[in-house]
Amino acid sequence: LGQRSYWDAAYAAGKYRDNYEWLQTAEELWPYIERAIEGGAGLRVLHVGCGNSDLGRSLHDRGHQVVNVDYSGVVIEAMRARRPEQEWLQADCAERGALGPAGACDLCVDKG
């Protein structure tokens, strides 16, 4: 699971279907996210390791600007085609500077 090649191959083969939620769904997590947002509107939210989760859509639909990031280029391209209204970034979050300048987002969310 710790290899980019694993994720690219798994998404290309359809192993995680059109949508896969690790651990909990976006709706199950929403009360915790809402608490972190503290009523803020139009926040820029970094969704780390987004895969094909619905969490980015949930945040977007509630008026936030979401940057969905994953290191699998296969899933990023598939999600970009499916939801072009959202921002999608293929990057390795462990690489310094891969996500842009410090402070570019108001909140970072990682479901894992």
Image (spheres, grey):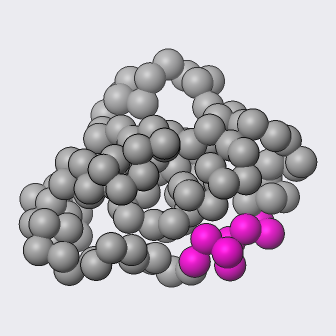
Task: Identify the image quadrant of the N terminus.
Answer: bottom left
Q: Is residue 61 left or right of residue 38?
A: left
Is residue 72 visible in the rendered image? The answer is: no
Please tell me which residue lies in front, 100 or 66.
66
Which residue occupies 58% across, 24% down? 104
Residue furthest to the right in view is 39
Which residue occupies 82% across, 40% down? 41
Dominant secondary-structure state across the stretch colored magenta: helix
Please tell me which residue lies in front, 88 or 97.
88
Q: Position of residue 73 (x, y in %)?
A: 21, 48
Q: Position of residue 109 (x, y in %)?
A: 59, 53
Q: Position of residue 70 (x, y in %)?
A: 34, 50
Q: Is residue 1 left or right of residue 31?
A: left
Q: Residue 35 is drawn in which quadrant?
A: bottom right
Q: Residue 61 is drawn in which quadrant?
A: bottom right
Q: Position of residue 74 (x, y in %)?
A: 19, 54
Q: Is residue 46 left or right of residue 37?
A: left
User: Does the stretch in magenta take in 31?
Assistant: yes
> Which segment did they paint magenta?
25-32
Is residue 5 visible in the rendered image? The answer is: yes
